[in-house]
Image: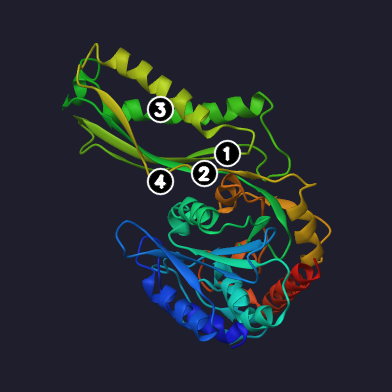
């Protein structure tokens, strides 16, 4: 099957982040089995989701992992001109949810299987396909650890095929997402100094978060490889109160920070938590049951900061035909693979500007470039 034919199959599975991905995994299983490729599933604790990894080539050190995720983001409320779960060719572009982010890369990997089997590889190629990437890279650690523990040989690195227009990316920001819940007292709004309004207190916390971001920038905590060139802290949703004349007893807000590699995610949250404890001590003098709690959406996603001189970077440049590298501001599983001991780069077909929006597409030319990159990788691993 060609890359386009496989992509047509993959986009037909409307697997959203958080949902079972077994339907698309079953199709991939059948495809690999049809080519005689042995694979391993790595299920989650429910058994409703699974990562998949496999090796093509010898059990030798120095192989390369090609990794991508099987889930996509929702299409609800988006004005699509075509069926988002049916691949549609218009001009030189292929339209569908996930065509760019990132089933195009998976399709290129799978279409290369017959060629990879025909080449006398001296070092292997691994496929690593995850679930729930779109809701916080929730299986990246699971998959990277499973590969590390499953194979006796040691892979030399990983290429994560997120859309980069086929330019190797050596850095990504990390991300952490929280819901902070403030619980105060109740009463008539005229008693504002005798009660503790949760909305007012939430405003203090939100202002602190904004000021924290600016303090980091003022302290010179920047990295010009990224745009924006600093750790961003953002509050995107807030809810609280019941009426203008009732002191709000609860308010919650969702916020995230996307940290550059030099900024420690734990340190940022610890500073915020210290300020929250300070507010609790102060406001409990008025209302003893005042509290501030935090609920993480997922474990922190680590940033990526691969050295320019790393062998995986030289390899990515060589096989992609690109002499320059860059960084991305979005989070991906590359930092998780790197932390598991696999030096990583991000390099894949498509433009991130097309991801997560109506009429998402990948250019046919981008898929062709990705096909050629994997062919070049096979030639590189066969020659050494």
Rendered image quadrant of residue 166: bottom right
Query: Is residue 143 shown above or below 12?
Result: above
In the shown orientation, is residue 118 left or right of residue 204?
A: right
Name the residue tied to disc 3: 205
- For the residue carrying disc 1, how many other residues have a C-alpha within 10 Å: few (<14), some (14-19), or many (20+)? many
Q: Which of the pair 2/341 is nearer the observer?
A: 341
Q: Which of the pair 330/312 is nearer the observer?
A: 312
- For the residue carrying disc 2, how many other residues have a C-alpha within 10 Å: few (<14), some (14-19), or many (20+)? many
- For the residue carrying disc 4, how many other residues have a C-alpha within 10 Å: few (<14), some (14-19), or many (20+)? some
Q: Do the residues labelled 3 and 2 touch (CB within 8 Å)?
A: no
Q: How far apart are marks 4 and 3 (CA)?
A: 21 Å
Name the residue tied to disc 4: 298
Q: How far apart are marks 3 and 2 (CA)?
A: 19 Å
Residue at the far top in the pictured view: 285
- Tag 1 secondary structure: loop
Q: Of the residues under marks 2 and 1, which one precedes in the sequence?
A: 2
Q: Nearer the viewer, mark 3 or mark 2?
A: 2
The image shows residue 89 at horizontal and vertical percentages of 59, 86
Q: How far apart are marks 2 and 1 (CA)?
A: 6 Å
Tell how many labels. 4
Q: In which quarter of the image is the C terminus?
A: bottom right
Name the residue tied to disc 1: 259
Q: Which mark is residue 223?
A: none
Residue positioned 76% across, 48% down in the render? 310
The image shows residue 211 at horizontal and vertical percentages of 53, 26
Q: Of the residues under marks 1 and 4, which one precedes in the sequence?
A: 1
Name the residue tied to disc 2: 175
């Amino acid at each position: 099957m060609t890359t386009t034919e496989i992509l047509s199959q993959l986009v037909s599975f409307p697997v959203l982040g958080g949902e079972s991905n077994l339907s698309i995994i079953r199709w991939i299983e059948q495809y690999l089995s049809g080519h005689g490729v042995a694979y391993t599933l790595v299920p989650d604790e429910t058994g409703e989701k699974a990562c998949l990894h496999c090796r093509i080539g010898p059990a030798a050190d120095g192989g390369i992992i090609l990794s991508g995720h099987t889930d996509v983001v929702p299409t609800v409320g988006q004005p699509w001109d075509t069926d988002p779960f049916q691949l549609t060719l218009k001009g030189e572009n292929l339209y569908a949810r996930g065509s760019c982010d990132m089933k195009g890369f998976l399709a290129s990997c799978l279409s290369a299987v017959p060629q990879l089997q025909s080449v006398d590889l001296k070092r292997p190629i691994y496929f690593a396909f995850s679930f729930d990437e779109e809701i916080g890279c929730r299986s990246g650690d699971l998959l990277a650890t499973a590969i590390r523990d499953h194979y006796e040989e040691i892979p030399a690195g990983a290429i994560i095929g997120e859309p980069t227009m086929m330019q190797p990316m050596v850095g990504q920001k990390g991300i952490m997402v929280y819901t902070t819940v403030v619980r105060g007292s109740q009463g008539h709004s005229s008693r504002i100094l005798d009660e503790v309004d949760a909305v007012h207190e939430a405003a203090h916390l939100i202002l602190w978060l904004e000021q924290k971001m600016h303090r980091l920038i003022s302290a010179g905590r920047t990295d010009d490889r990224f745009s924006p060139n600093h750790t961003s802290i953002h509050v995107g949703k807030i809810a609280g109160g019941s009426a203008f004349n009732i002191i709000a007893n609860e308010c919650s807000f969702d916020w995230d920070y996307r940290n550059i590699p030099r900024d420690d995610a734990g340190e940022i949250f610890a500073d915020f938590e210290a300020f929250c404890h300070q507010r609790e001590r102060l406001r409990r003098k008025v209302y003893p049951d005042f509290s501030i709690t935090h609920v993480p959406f997922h474990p922190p996603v680590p940033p990526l900061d691969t050295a320019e001189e790393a062998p995986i970077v030289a390899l990515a440049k060589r096989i992609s035909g690109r002499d320059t590298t860059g960084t991305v501001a979005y989070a991906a599983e590359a930092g998780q693979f790197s932390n598991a001991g696999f030096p990583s780069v991000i390099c894949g077909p498509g433009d991130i500007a097309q991801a997560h929006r109506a009429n998402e597409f990948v250019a046919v030319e981008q898929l062709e470039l990705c096909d050629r990159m994997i062919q070049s990788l096979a030639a590189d691993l066969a020659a050494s």
